[in-house]
Image (cartoon, rainbow, N blue to C red):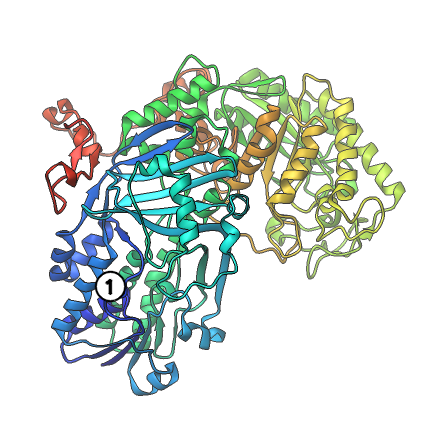
Amino acid sequence: MRIAIAGGGPGGLYFAALMKQLDPRHEVTVWERNAPDDTFGFGVVFSDETLGGIESADTAIYDQMARRFARWTDIDIQFNGQRFTVGGQGFAAMGRKDLLPILQQRAAELGVTVHYRTEAPDVDELRAAYDLVVAADGLNSRVRTKHADVFQPSLDHRENKYIWLGTDLVFEAFQFLVKQTEWGTMQIHGYPYSDQGSTFIVEMHQDVWRRAGFDATENDTFPPGESDEYAVDRIRDIFADELDGHRVLTNNSKWLNFVTVRNQRWHHDNIVLLGDAAHTAHFSIGSGTKLAMEDALALAACLHEHTSVEAALDAYQGERKPVVESTQRAAQASLEWFENIGTYADQDPAQFCFNLLTRSRRITFENLKDRDAEFAARIEASFAQANDEPDVVPAMFQPVRIGQLQLNNRIVVSPMDMYSAEDGLANDFHLVHLGSKALGGAGLVMTEMACVSPEGRITPGCTGLWNGQQRDAYRRITDFVHQQTAAKIGLQLGHSGRKGSTRLMWEGMDRPLAENNWDLISPTAAPYGEGCHVPRAVTREDLDKVLADFVTAAQRGVEAGFDLIEVHAAHGYLLSSFLSPIANQRHDEYGGTLENRLRFPLEVFDAVRAVVPDTIPVTVRISAHDWTPGGNTEDDAVEIARAFVEHGAAAIDVSSGQITKDEKPAYGRSYQTPFADRIRQLVAAPASVKVIAVGAISSYDDVNSILLAGRADLCALGRSHLYNPHWTLHAAAEQDHRPDGAFWPLQFRAGRRKPPTSRTDKIPPRLALLRKPSEENVHMRWAPHRGHANGEGSVGKNQP
């Protein structure tokens, strides 16, 4: 093959070397616009997995790298004057100035032609003359830009400012130094890369950056290689204590905003993207060099394994794109956490530390227990102490209070429409459905949305509370829950609005009924989406009727014996439609500004709160993000939540979306939890209002991680309880937990131990059981200044 590579960074050079090793007959040419000794940046971090791939593919390169590695396992976190060390992570780093010469030398040895100080020819010239063109030309890729119509790139420019620096202070571990200044929160990401120095990245929100005066050079233009010395001087002063007399090192150092690069496609004909040209991931979770070298490994392997370029590039994209997208989801969560780091300034230091460690959702509490059991136990004990509980038990089994309602654990069965009622009447199905979830150990079981009127139903199969017969049917269910279980049961009240008069879910979600339709109302006469009913705009008389319907339904809910009442103001139903500018385009006092859009939902909430005894908490579910341009965002959600809290909401149940069919949610594990987190930090926690997180939470590990980090007070799980009605009790068994937080009915207690697996005769070696884990293995620190070099100076934290 004749291969052209635009870009002589680590990814391009490594790919070139691999291809020449696979077949020396390949003609590989690299164009690099910089000189061979022009190296920007400081340290590069690798994971053990990446290093394993590099070692297998090219031992010569790996051996050269390994001689220069700084290795350690610890993360040090300094916050509000306290310092924490967490072990068991595993890192290897080296200087970028050391890595590039290794790759350059290896490429030269293998016969790769590299043109330094030379821009690559136009990509269309290259694609005509070569069998393969590799665009390894970085963040601002010319190749990607020229064929943007095919690659379909998206560039997400973030708000935080960061500057990449170095220091001759040799850190012993990864450092997160979080500093509260008079201008706001600033943080340092630092790690050692040799026995000579460390990477020292300063990051802060753009607002903090401006208040601190760093914008003085905002309009200055710095030539390539020149650094912002004004910023460096300010940083030396602000972080003088942390630097402890050591120097700040510069290398083309200037303020940047991180840009997340994504591409719909990674290849076009014989052109393929690699490294930053294809993707970027925030530095707080990964290294662009690491990802680029992983790309190179995969691309070389695919070309070796397939007989055509087209098949190889398809395989490369199929292999790497899902992996990178997973990394980018984690990186997105991490960068957003750092953008909002100031909201955690008042957190307990231990909780803040755990929050930081689990910010990307890749590290969980169970992961942490495996890595550093001592620190994990400290976090669990701190959570119990903060909640005035004498027993240290899993966070999900710590009791919690919503208003005056005491729950014996923090698991909620989320409201789930069953579409199984007739004339709004809950029946035996609902008794078994809700009763089984209560028997399954959850602290709170929520009904599906009980509609306040016949025309407020979503489908003909929805339950309601518009008459006494429906009240009595629900009373049968609440009596069962109270008599046979330790759970509490909550009622969700709502009105479908423009999403009503549709078929049962399994007959076609959101599809209009073929006949027997009923009158639909909405703030504006606009349908939910294509093919949906067109509602009529509500009148004053409609609003008065809806308000009265909510009041009488709430009164029936009290009479039916419910322990909690939730007002449903989410998912595009009537109250949610008022809140969203997508569905509400009115020009009266109920439309326009957020204050006006809140008016009717708050009127309903106030009316419900007024007729419900103080002993029964009234909560609200909101959609925290509309997932569509022009819709509500997490910032609007904070103000919406604040308004409901001011009107007496005992808890905010934080969901998102379903405002319009045109939405594009960013699905993923626990994907809605950041919205709950933001509301809890900015609104709820100061007011002692509870926040419920919901959305793709499925494991007890994720639940405990969310609670321990302070992102929510309770977690609601829906589909997990459909899969396993005894989810909570099984979570207790998995965690070896038996106290009152996991109530096993007397009839079930014989089954509260986890059943044995098929292998019951396997006996672990006894001596292995007696041997304690070595603390040195958990806490290994980089300390070459103690008389060692080349990676041999890593020591346990208690060694002299």
Image coords of residue 514 (percent x, y): 73, 56
Q: Is residue 416 above or below residue 147?
A: above
**Front-most of 332 and 762?**
332
**Front-most of 745 and 330?**
330
Callout count: 1
Residue position marked by numbered label 1 in the rendering:
297
Image coords of residue 453 (percent x, y): 78, 37
Q: Residue at x 54, y 21 (%)?
A: 487
Q: Residue at x 43, y 22 (%)?
A: 383
Image coords of residue 531 (percent x, y): 70, 61
Q: Quadrant of residue 261?
A: bottom left
Q: Is residue 222 above or below residue 580?
A: below
**Front-most of 121 and 118?**
118
Residue 212 in sight in this render: yes
Looking at the figure, which quarter contains the N terminus? bottom left
Left or right side of 138 for 67: left
Image coords of residue 506 (percent x, y): 59, 50
List the single residue furthest toward the top. 390
Q: Is residue 774 above or below residue 333?
A: above
Left or right side of 254 for 54: left
List the single residue furthest toward the right. 541
Q: Residue at x 82, y 52 (%)?
A: 536
Q: Residue at x 12, y 72 (%)?
A: 109
Q: Amino acid at mark 1?
A: Leu
Residue 753 in sight in this render: no
Left or right side of 657 for 33: left
**Front-most of 33 and 527?**
33
Q: Secondary structure at mark 1?
A: helix
Looking at the figure, which quarter contains the C terminus? top left
Within-10-Å neighbours for mark 1: few <14, some 14–19, many 20+: many
